[in-house]
Amino acid sequence: MNKTDLSKFNNSWYKPGGNRVKRIFWYFVNVLFFLNPWNPISFLKVFLLRIFGAKIGKGVIIKPSVNIKYPWRLSVGNNVWIGEKVWIDNLANVEIGNNVSISQGAMLLCGNHNYKKSTFDLITGDIKLEEGVWIGAFSIVTPGITCKSHSILAVNSVATKNLEAYTIYQGNPAAEIRKRTIEE
């Protein structure tokens, strides 16, 4: 690709929300309080997310080194665990239900690029994690995916299609491996 080809890139249709000042301010707050591995204070992170427009429930734990692109596009239910080094790249809306666990190093990626076009147009899609979902360590959820109630995405797997309720998925791309039975 030569220098002139770069001028074709035009994703001006995309609107991240928040004005430029808010996005710049969030960048520094994210670096100082979220990405910083020396900040274990979860309630402070919850407070800051709410200030920036996120909807956050009760009992939410956010571990160190978490990266959140745009808090105003984030909704988190009650009793949610967000592990170390989780990346929520929410170019679109991310909705996380109650009692969800997102293990360390997992990625929720709401954006991708259309490789079929020389302009690599941006493609975005909302991500929804319904109640009781568990996203395993170092797993990836791709744009437009819904992980239905109590589904599991196993360690180091990639969800490229919706995950059905009470089902365990594994691999790249993730495939159903068995049903999830919850014992009381």
Image: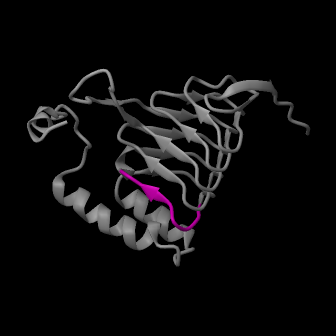
For the point 37% across and 34% down, which residue is it? 112
Q: Main secondary structure of the magenta part?
A: loop
Residue 86 percent across, percent down from the top left: 54, 55
Which quadrant of the structure image shows residue 97? top right
Q: Residue pushed farthest bottom?
A: 38
Q: Residue furthest front?
A: 2
Range covered by the magenta-colored residues: 62-69
Above/below status of 127 relative to 178: below
Q: Position of residue 134 (x, y in %)?
A: 69, 42
| Quarter of the figure that contains the N terminus | top left
In the displayed structure, 133 sits above or below 81; it is: above
Residue 149 image position (x, y, % from top left): 68, 30
Residue at the image point whose x is 68% and y is 45% from the top: 136
How many numbered discs, if any?
A: 0
92 in relation to 42, above or below: above
User: Residue 156 in magenta?
Assistant: no
Left or right side of 165 for 129: left
Q: Is residue 55 left or right of residue 146?
A: left
**What colour scheme does the image use?**
one colour
Task: Pick the residue in front: 68 or 160.
Answer: 160
Image quarter in which the C terminus is found: top right
Image coordinates for residue 59, horizontal then vertical, percent: 63, 58
Q: Is residue 159 left or right of residue 21?
A: right
Q: Say whether residue 63 is magenta.
A: yes
